[in-house]
Image: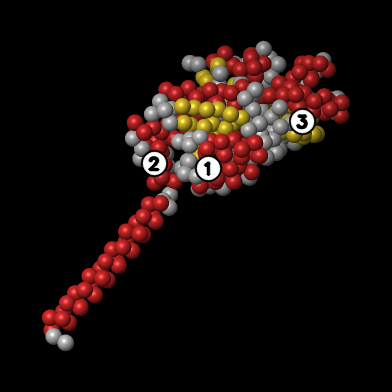
Amino acid sequence: MGLNKVNTKIIRGRRSRIGAVAIIAVVASLILSGCGSGSEVAGKKSAQELEGALISVITSPLDNPYWRTEADTITAEGKRMGYQVNVVSHDADPKKESDLVDTAITKKSAAIVLDPAGADSSIGNASKANAAGIPVFLVNAEINEQGIAKSQLVSNNAQGAVLGAQQFAEAMGRKGEYVELVGLSTDTNAAVRSNGFASVLGQFPDLKKVQSETADWDQKKGFDKMQTMLQAHPDLKGVIAGNDQMALGAISALKQAGKLDQVVVGGFDGNQDAVNAVKNGEMAYTVVQPVVDFSTDVVHQIDSYLRTGKTGVDDEKQLFDCSLVTRANAGEWQDFQHKK
């Protein structure tokens, strides 16, 4: 075989190998681009692409003024920034939440804001949206897993519970029998607040918790549970509640029994009915959750993520400190906001 023919074969072999390497590189690039992370898929969109994009908000029962404020704040800020916003409620039902997430996916939402129905049950629902390339942002309550939601924005419930319990102890004169109304068992906020109360009230040996009942954040259930506990504990001196709706239900039961002036009642949320009850002396205090603040911030984090692939904050979990409302400053609070 001549030298030229040998050289030709070698060159062809090299070209063949180079071509194969190039093909493999192209295929690998396509695979990686198709299987990229959520930030690569959802982020870095232009203002024109995002104009009128849909943010789906899935939250808790909207007859509660706290969750209504959450939904209204996200809606107003989203529209101000050029988005469409659709709000629905899962009514604390994980199955309904799952169906609503499916609908949000079908509607090709740009992002989902989720106030979780459950710390564990909502993990799968958030994961499902994430797998569909739709970023999920959590507000108010957490899920028991990180790395699924882009952000989890919640009140600093432990800090707020300590504030409330300290005020409750002082209003009780650091002694007497009291009961506790606890929120929904699947909501991490209920346990965090209850543990926060215990960490403070347990320091006072003359304060005695004689009963604890779950009332699911609900005013009617708070009323019913309070009636039952009053019958069991006629010398009751205090009621500490995990949210305002349960506290307001307890107040109604105490009024009906003619005992409101003998019992200290403390709440948590800072809704306007509770603030008014503090003003008129029916409730000793309430703890305000900064729902307007984190509901505004979540829209900005969504917008940042969709434009840049980053939320603009360092941590997935973000805590927003609570504030204490007493009769001395109740006039300064309106619709979860401090009016200076």
The span from disc 3 to disc 2 (Cα, nearest Å) is 49 Å
Q: Give the quadrant of residue 177.
A: top right
**Residue of label 2:** 43
Considering the image in quadrants, where does the N terminus appear? bottom left
Of callouts 2 and 1, which one flags the residue occurring earlier in the amino acid sequence? 2
Residue at the location (58% across, 43% down)?
125
Give left or right: position of 253 versus 76: right
The residue where tag 3 is placed is 179
In the shown orientation, is residue 337 left or right of residue 90? left
Q: Nearer the viewer, residue 16 or 113?
A: 16
Q: Position of residue 40 (x, y in %)?
A: 39, 46
Instruction: Please give the residue where the numbered disc 1 appears in the rendered image.
Output: 129
Q: What amino acid type should be assigned to the residue bearing mark 3?
A: Val
Pinpoint residue 14: horizontal percent, then vertical percent: 23, 73
Visible residue check, residue 151: no
In the foreground, 37 or 179: 37
The three-letter code of the residue at mark 1 reads Ala
